């Protein structure tokens, strides 16, 4: 009987000890919270790191939420942040809040708070990324932009800025990945296609460039830059008529689109079909007087006609010049004068365009408008001619 009693007593003691063990496991979280509240973040970190690997407490939302709070507090402390590796506080706080939401959902006691904390982390990650980018620490910037994107997967801004940082770092593959990620997020932007096209051209990948261009045209069928690029590719590959057919179809579908006529005018210019180009430029200006390209090209048309006339006069022998030279010079002056309103309108639309400034400055000079010529020449110098 005595032996039986001792065995029973031992069992009783063991049973009584079980709550003590469970309590010890939970106390790590409690201690972490108490140390955090009293500002002892290093001790709070040690406690919570123990709790996070314990099978009893690692499955509780409270544990993970507390861990997030502690690492976030350390990250924001001028003292305790020095005990963390670069980016460690932000990363672990994010992981902790994400795990909290996973365990507790967004509507649970701790999950709801974690959602709010995640919003704050996004701002911190994004701002750190901007600061790193401005300091030309592109790897850090990219890492923080990617973290910001993880925190808010639906947000496109961090992904876009990550692409810019990758380009600044000359990481073309990384930039392409980010731009393509944006397209996968249904992000609508002419700039994204333009950058992908430029990157493909930088890498000399003509097939990729052609593929991207067709995607860009499918998304923006009347975009002037993409149509011109398509035109140039078609002309370079000997398919000028194919490009002309595409533009004609676009005009038939959208006959009041000024840009389409400006593009076709540029194509005719390249094919030396000057009269057809002139008609399209005039149509483009008629539809939209603020079409810079059309205004500038009409100025160029008249400028070139003037230059041709003066060149013919300058190449005449004395006898021929006495007979016909003045007529060609008068014709040249007429075309120079005709170019002025087009160049002036183009300059009004784009005041710092060097080609327009230079062309108009030369026209003013040839027309004897010395003050205007000197004014534009001074502006060219100020722009770094």
Image: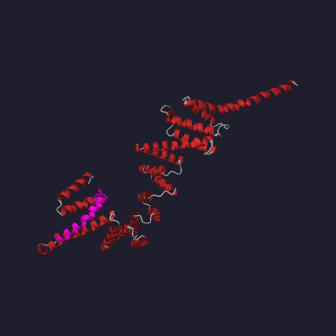
Residue 270 visible: no
Total labels drawn: 0
- Relative to 328, 81 lies left or right: right
The residue lying at 50 percent from left, 40 percent from top is 87
Nearest the viewer among 73 and 132 is 73
The residue lying at 45 percent from left, 50 percent from top is 161
Residue 146 location (% of width, % of height): 50, 47
* Relative height, residue 333 to residue 8 (above, below): below
Q: Is residue 340 magenta?
A: yes
The residue lying at 56 percent from left, 37 percent from top is 69
Image quarter where the C terminus lies is: bottom left
* Relative height, residue 257 to residue 154 (above, below): below
Residue 8 location (% of width, % of height): 82, 28
Image quarter where the N terminus lies is: top right
Residue 108 location (% of width, % of height): 63, 43
* Residue segment shown in magenta: 329-355
Q: Is residue 189 magenta?
A: no
Judged by its main secondary structure, the magenta piece is helix
- Relative to 236, 73 lies left or right: right
Residue 97 location (% of width, % of height): 58, 42
Picture quarter containing residue 100?
Answer: top right
Q: Which residue ends up furthest to the right in the rendered image?
A: 1
Nearest the viewer among 305 and 207 is 305
Picture quarter containing residue 12?
Answer: top right
Picture quarter containing residue 300?
Answer: bottom left
- Relative to 29, 340 lies left or right: left
């Amino acid at each position: 009987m005595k032996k039986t009693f001792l065995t029973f007593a031992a069992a009783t003691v063991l049973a009584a000890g079980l709550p003590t063990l469970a309590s010890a496991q939970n106390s790590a979280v409690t201690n972490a919270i108490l140390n955090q509240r009293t500002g002892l973040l290093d001790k709070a970190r040690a406690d919570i790191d123990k709790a996070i690997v314990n099978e009893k407490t690692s499955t509780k939302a409270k544990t993970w939420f507390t861990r997030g709070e502690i690492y976030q507090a350390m990250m924001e402390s001028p003292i305790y942040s020095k005990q963390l590796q670069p980016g460690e506080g932000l990363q672990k706080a994010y992981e902790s809040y994400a795990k909290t939401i996973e365990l507790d959902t967004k509507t649970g006691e701790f999950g709801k708070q974690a959602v709010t904390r995640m919003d704050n982390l996004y701002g911190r990650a994004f701002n750190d990324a901007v600061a790193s980018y401005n300091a030309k620490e592109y790897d850090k910037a990219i890492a923080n932009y990617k973290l910001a994107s993880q925190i808010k997967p639906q947000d496109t801004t961090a992904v876009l800025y990550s692409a810019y940082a990758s380009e600044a770092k000359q990481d073309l593959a990384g930039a392409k990945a980010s731009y393509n990620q944006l397209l996968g997020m249904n992000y609508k932007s002419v700039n994204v296609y333009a950058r992908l096209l430029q990157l493909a051209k930088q890498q000399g990948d003509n097939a990729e460039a052609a593929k991207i261009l067709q995607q860009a045209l499918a998304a923006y069928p009347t975009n002037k830059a993409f149509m011109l690029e398509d035109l140039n590719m078609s002309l370079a590959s000997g398919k000028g008529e194919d490009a002309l057919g595409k533009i004609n179809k676009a005009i038939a579908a959208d006959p009041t689109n000024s840009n389409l006529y400006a593009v076709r005018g540029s194509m005719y210019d390249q094919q030396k079909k000057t009269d057809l180009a002139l008609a399209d430029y005039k149509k483009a200006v008629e539809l939209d007087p603020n079409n810079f390209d059309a205004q500038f090209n009409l100025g160029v048309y008249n400028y070139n006609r003037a230059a041709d006339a003066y060149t013919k006069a300058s190449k005449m022998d004395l006898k021929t010049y006495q007979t016909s030279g003045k007529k060609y010079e008068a014709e040249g002056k007429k075309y120079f004068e005709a170019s002025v309103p087009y160049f002036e309108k183009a300059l009004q639309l784009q005041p710092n365009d060097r080609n327009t400034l230079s062309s108009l400055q030369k026209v003013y000079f040839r027309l004897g408008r010395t003050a205007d010529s000197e004014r534009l020449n001074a502006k060219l110098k100020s722009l770094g001619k």
